[in-house]
Image (cartoon, helix red, strand yellow):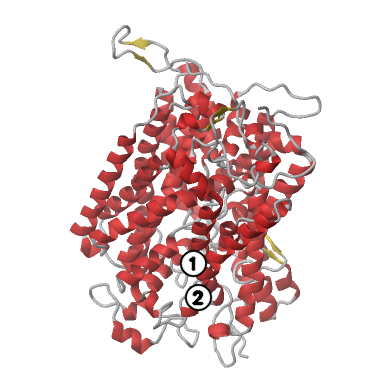
Amino acid sequence: MQMEAQPSHPITTPLLVEDEKNRNSSSLSTPSLELDNSLVEQVALTVPVTDDPNLPVVTFRMWVLGILSCILLSFVNQFFGYRREPITFTSASAQIAVVPLGHLMASTITDRVFFKGTPLEFTLNPGPFNVKEHVLITIFANSGAGSVLAVHIVNTVKIFYRKNMTFFVSLLVVITSQVLGFGWAGMFRRYLVEPASMWWPHNLVQVSLFRALHEKEERLKGGVTRNQFFIIASICSFAYYILPGYFFPMLTSLSLLCWIFPNSVTAHQLGSGFHGLGVGVVGLDWSTISSYLGSPLASPWFATANVAVGFVIVTYIISPTAYWLNIYNAKTFPIFSDGLFTSSGDKYNISSIIDSKFNLNAEAYERNGPLYLSTFFTVTYGIGFATLSATIVHVLLFHGRDIWQLSKSALKERRMDVHTRLMSKYKQVPEWWFVCILLTSIGATIFACEYYNDQLQLPWWGVLLGCAVSIFFTLPIGIIAATTNQTLGLNIITEYIIGYLYPGRPIANICFKVYGHISMTQAITFLQDLKLGHYMKIPPRTLFMAQVVGTFIAAVVYLGTAWWLIDSVHDICNVDLLPPNSPWTCPSDHVFYDASVIWGLIGPRRIFGELGTYSAVNWFFLAGALAPLIAWLAHKAFPNHQWIHLINMPILIGATRDMPPATVVNFTSWLIVGFISGFIIYRYQRVWWQRHNYVLSGALDVGLAFMGVLLYLCLGSENITLRWWGSGIRENDCHLASCPTAKGVVVKGCPVF
């Protein structure tokens, strides 16, 4: 069945080309049928439907360029991850950079065949550099482009708590937490990779780049090829980033209200992009736009619309209402902050409530009084509760029957699109490969936690419980990620569970979070790469090999880079001691540390339980569970109302899951670009969108990456700064936004009400 574009309306959800009467049902499982193209229009417009199984894949240049890409991306992502606005270097950077190198190696390395006629026969140069080699190199790069959350444990222990953690123990935690995800990925391949409806939108960016870089395309009169467009856009991105990256940093957040009312606390609270509600704020910097939410050009419009609604509800309705009604003495604290406070609004002295064994000193905590959070920080935790319950209920209501049917069926009994049919000729990865890796990593994790319990605190049963939580949520969250390009997290629920079961131990809490949360997110990353290989027809066993090797390399390089920076950069992450406008403020690590205090050291019982101030926040669990039910009933009651089909409650409710450390300006800028790309251009310039949208996304990443590294090497490493009013982000971005407005509360630099 050939896909046809439908320009009369924008694609708001993955458009399944089938009988309109059947659109209410998922296509995870259907009777046996072979299709000539994908059911999803975006996939049909982007992914090629041909395959050449004779192309050499595992080559010398693939190993060299793949490992080099993995090492470099791991280094720069960890290096720039400590910045105030962290720059995330995606695999698109390496995807582009290796092309001339691949062609150079193909033209210069000897094509001599060694050990000809024997089982050991090989050659360093099997012919022209081809797209399948390129895909495998990109899989290596993806390993380096993904985050290694376990490094936050090292940062938290060594920087914030100033305790000892050896490199060997750190390496064990990093590697085992990364590798655990292979097990879950292997278990859920048949649900999240093979079905056509699991389309993984972000992969289309990379597929578009592969086609632009390898397919010969004739230039239309008066136009440019996709390859030429990519080069032009990359150069523009490279040249532009020198403005927000060095000459004019205020472009990262332009706050109109603060300029109009420079002495008004309320105006600053409303207008600040970093410390307030960001009314009228915009960021003209691609790192601001894509640093936390990823590329808005890769997000389907229906997912962007859900994020927009959820963001508006949380940021402009719930949070300001709670603040100005002074719920939980909200006016005593900043309106937007990830800080930890006393009842008087002072910074909480965490070191005073830790005993010699690195546990909570309950008597000291009683003397100091309860810990308080800002309004927005409290609301985001409640949103995290609601997102978790909404995800479970949503998947059960909208996908439960199809998951059950798929569990009972074999591959030949399911709908098979052209990509699944072409991949069926290759040897699949046996299940026992994944099982062996899974059991080995669980065993190594238990050994690390038991033998080095003085450093990790987590008991053996905590490891098994973390694995159970991870495996339970991988499928529902994977379905959301595969269809919306939004990956929900388990960080809050894992902190909540271990915080109740094993309170007073901050490192045990964050270790449990890493094993319960990061192994799930790693599984999602592996599954996304498996789908990329599925689209590009990479032999599954070869792809598996690249994922395993890349994961180990990335783990070592991420940890080594962090270890070096901790020892090299004086007072890294310590905002109070760093010089003004220092880039080494580590926003993500601050949030990770705060979470270890809230959930691990003090514990949810003393904050969100019967002994805590914020016990009412638990009602968000119920609200989250009811929200998908309401959407499902509306879906059934009004099947002909298209806009109801757009509602995805887990995405809508969890829109602000990255705030903090993400700020309002990250969201407002992301939503503007997402609206222009996903709605306006897709609706009115469908041909341009098809040819250039995903290519533009990759070009913006590449230009930013190269200029970011160049600025640091040439200027940042030598502390060469430019001082003028446009470079002072902290001083000019609404410095009164963090002031309390409660009567009598005194904070340095703030007016007293």
Could you tell me the amino acid type at mark 1?
Phe
| Placement of 2 over or under 570, stated as above or below | above
Locate residue 391 relative to residue 285 in the image: left or right.
left
- Using the image as rendered, state which of residue 395 and residue 569 is in the foreground: 395
Locate residue 40 relative to residue 561 in the image: left or right.
right
Q: Which mark is residue 385?
A: 1
Residue 609 visible within the image? yes
Query: At x 39% / y 25%, what residue is drawn?
Result: 427
Position in image of residue 281 (x %, y %): 69, 64
Q: Residues under labels 1 and 2: Cα distance? A: 8 Å
| Placement of 310 over or under 204, stated as above or below | below
Query: At x 53% / y 49%, what residue is drawn?
Result: 399
| Placement of 441 over or under 468, stated as above or below | above
Query: At x 47% / y 17%, what residue is drawn?
Result: 108
Characterize the local packing of mark 2: few (<14), some (14-19) or many (20 or more) Cα atoms within 10 angstroms: some
Question: Residue reaching furthest top?
Answer: 117
Q: Quadrant of the N terminus?
A: top right
Tell me where residue 371 sits by quadrant.
bottom left
